[in-house]
Structure formats: structure tokens, C-alpha cells
């Protein structure tokens, strides 16, 4: 099956762009928390918790899941990964909504 090799190559190619994205997200989460902490501590802490949940989901669920997919193609695991990605995008969208709401 060619999928495991394709997946390994995909993961190698995506590591740098995803790393830059997470670095940017981490800096923006830290800045948002710092800026909001004095004025609206609940919003600041919620934004930080949403980011930590997103990072936790990525590193504790997605990374092992992708490592499994790199070993063997499994349509059910691939479907689960796509479904779980909705949660990750949802967490990021909520954090973005908090930032935009604060800036308006």
C-alpha cells in the first residue's frame, strides 16, 4: 500500500509550516492573554485555555494518530482524524472570535 509512505512524506513536508503556525498561535495567545488579563481576566483566561486545549488535542491526540496512519492506511482512522480536526478548528475559531470581539 502506498498510503503509509505518502503519509510519512506529507508529515515531513508539513512539519515546518505547522511549526510556524503553532509558534505564531502561541505568541498571539500569550499576547492576547497578557493584554486582556488586566481589563477582562475571564476573556484572557478563556482564550489561553482554548489555545491550550488546541495544543493538547494536537500533540496528545493528532500526533500519535498520525504516527499510526504512517504505519498503516486505515480508512476509519483517517475519517476519525478528519472528524477530530473539526474540534481543533472549532477551538481556534472560538479563540479568534474572542480576539475579534475584544478588538471591536
Image: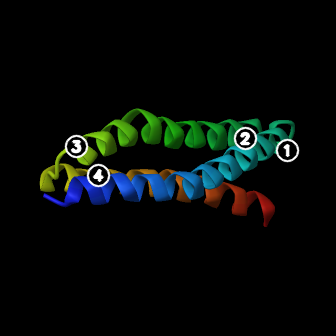
| Separation of residues labelled 4 and 2 (CA atoms) | 29 Å
Q: Mark 2 and mark 1 in contact (Cβ < 8 Å)? A: yes
Mark carried by residue 44: 2
Q: Earlier in the sequence, mark 1 or mark 3?
A: 1
Q: Earlier in the sequence, mark 4 or mark 1?
A: 1
Q: Earlier in the sequence, mark 4 or mark 3?
A: 3
Q: State the residue lying farthest toward the bottom.
A: 104
Q: Which residue is tagged 1?
A: 35
- Quadrant (top left/top right/bottom left/bottom right) for the C terminus: bottom right
Label 2 sits on a secondary structure element that is helix
| Separation of residues labelled 4 and 1 (CA atoms) | 34 Å
Of circles 4 and 3, the one toward us is 3
Residue in the image at 59% along x and 42% along y: 51
Packing grade of label 4 (10 A; few <14, some 14-19, many >=20) is some
Residue in the image at 76% along x and 36% along y: 41
Percent across and percent down for residue 93 are 54, 59
Q: Which residue is tagged 3?
A: 71
Residue in the image at 74% along x and 50% along y: 28
| Separation of residues labelled 3 and 2 (CA atoms) | 40 Å
Q: Which residue is tagged 4?
A: 81
Indicate whether 33 appears above or below 76.
above
Amino acid at each position: 500500500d502506498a498510503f503509509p509512505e505518502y503519509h510519512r512524506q506529507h508529515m515531513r513536508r508539513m512539519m515546518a509550516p505547522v511549526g510556524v503556525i503553532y509558534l505564531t498561535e502561541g505568541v498571539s495567545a500569550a499576547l492576547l492573554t497578557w493584554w486582556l488579563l488586566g481589563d477582562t481576566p475571564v476573556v484572557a483566561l478563556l482564550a489561553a485555555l482554548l489555545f491550550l486545549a488546541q495544543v493538547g488535542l494536537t500533540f496528545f491526540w493528532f500526533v500519535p494518530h498520525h504516527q499510526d496512519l504512517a504505519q498503516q492506511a486505515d480508512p476509519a482512522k483517517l475519517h476519525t482524524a478528519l472528524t477530530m480536526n473539526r474540534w481543533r478548528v472549532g477551538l481556534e475559531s472560538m479563540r479568534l472570535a474572542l480576539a475579534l470581539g475584544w478588538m471591536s
